[in-house]
Image: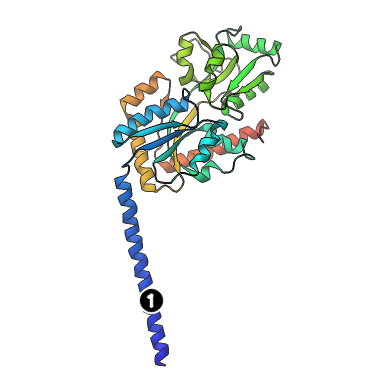
Amino acid sequence: MKRIKTVCLSSFFLHKFLLLSTVILSVFGGLSVNSWAQEFPNRPIKFIVPLAPGGATDTVTRIVAKQVSQILNNPVIVENRIGAGGLIAMESMTKVPADGYTLFVGNLSTNALNQTVFEKKMKFKPEDELTGVSILATIPHILVSSAKFEPKTFAEAITFIKNHPQKVNHASPGVGSYSMIDMVTLEKAAGLNMTHVPYNGGVGQFLIPMISNDVQIAFINASSVIEMIRAGNLRALAVTTDKRLAELPNTPTMSEVGYPGIGTNAWQGLFAPKKTPPAVVAKIHAAVVEALKSEEVKDAFKKQLIIPVSSNSPEDFNLFLKSEVTRWANIVKSIQLQVD
């Protein structure tokens, strides 16, 4: 009988000991994470851009990174990892530590569209590997042609393309990009037949070929082409915004030329590895929001026709992202696009 009592008593104390140990570890573990968040950052942060220099995502990244660096009083390095429409850079993010020191600047294509278009090709889903920190910007798009392309207006371009099937090249930042999808949608709506020329490194890779008229037409974000339009190297045929852009008062909207709803005003956003501590994500989010409110960023964006936009919280950005994944999955299915 005594032996039984002794065993029960030992079990009782063992249970209490384990419970107390769990509480202590939980408390001190929490203190450790909070301490880490308070000390963050204490070494350079890297922003990974999945596309080539010169495009909208790269432009947005460099402007924001400079201001975030000042706010955090810490170096922020921008690194371009191009290829496969952003898949190479994104896959590399699945292998980095979830500590907030390596972040990813993605966009509508890389983080909302690719997982539908490249469903058979991707080894992961972006939403399973990355968590949103904040949206950074939205940018209107312009249907642009080479200044050396014979047609001078949207209507003339449509007529010319119809009369020259497969002779006109349209460029995009890669197969499955929203720019390509917008053009395919326009082709179907207007009864056109063009040749698609993809540049998987992004817009920055096909601006020179477009100026030289090797490719003739494309939907391109305004920030990447506004200076070339002003210089007369490229021609604006239509804009994707609801109203005409103040900077291009003579360029009609897609609605005005008879194709409402075609064309995308794209977004860029900042992402961290999925398991990054929430306190670290919150600190980065706060710095980004402050950066986007600064006059330095606003002025730099305005010159490039970029609109600064921030998320109220990382949670809000992730909810927005889920809605975008669903929306673009429906668009992709409607045009029966899939890349093996």
Q: Quadrant of residue 183?
A: top right
Front residue of 8 and 87: 87
Tally of numbered discs:
1
Secondary structure beneath label 1: helix
Q: Quadrant of residue 304?
A: top left
- Spot occupied by residue 307 in the image (x, y as percentages of width and height): 42, 25
* Place of residue 197 in the rendered image (x, y in percent of width and height, measured from the top left): 62, 21
Q: Position of residue 148 (x, y in %)?
A: 57, 7
Q: Name the residue carrying label 1.
A: 14
Image quarter (top left, top right, bottom left or bottom right) of the C terminus? top right
Res. 240 visible in picture: no
- In percent of width and height, residue 265 lies at 51, 26
Left or right: 202 as drawn, with respect to 168: left
Horizontal arrangement in the rendering, residue 107 relative to residue 281 (left or right): right
Vertical side of 289 occupied by 21: above or below: below
The residue that appears at 61% across and 30% down in the rendered structure is 176
Q: Is residue 114 or residue 138 the one in the foreground?
A: 114
**Vertical order, 222 against 315 (above or below):** above
Tell me: residue 29, above or below residue 331: below
**Quadrant of the image containing the N terminus:** bottom left
- Which of 1 and 294 lies nearest the eye of the viewer? 1
For the point 40% across and 36% down, the residue is 46
Q: Type of residue at label 1? A: Leu
Q: How is the image coloured?
A: rainbow
Can residue 74 be seen here? The reply is yes
Disc 1 packing (10 Å; few <14; some 14–19; many ≥20): few
Q: Residue furthest bottom?
A: 1
Q: Residue at x 62, y 11 (%)?
A: 157
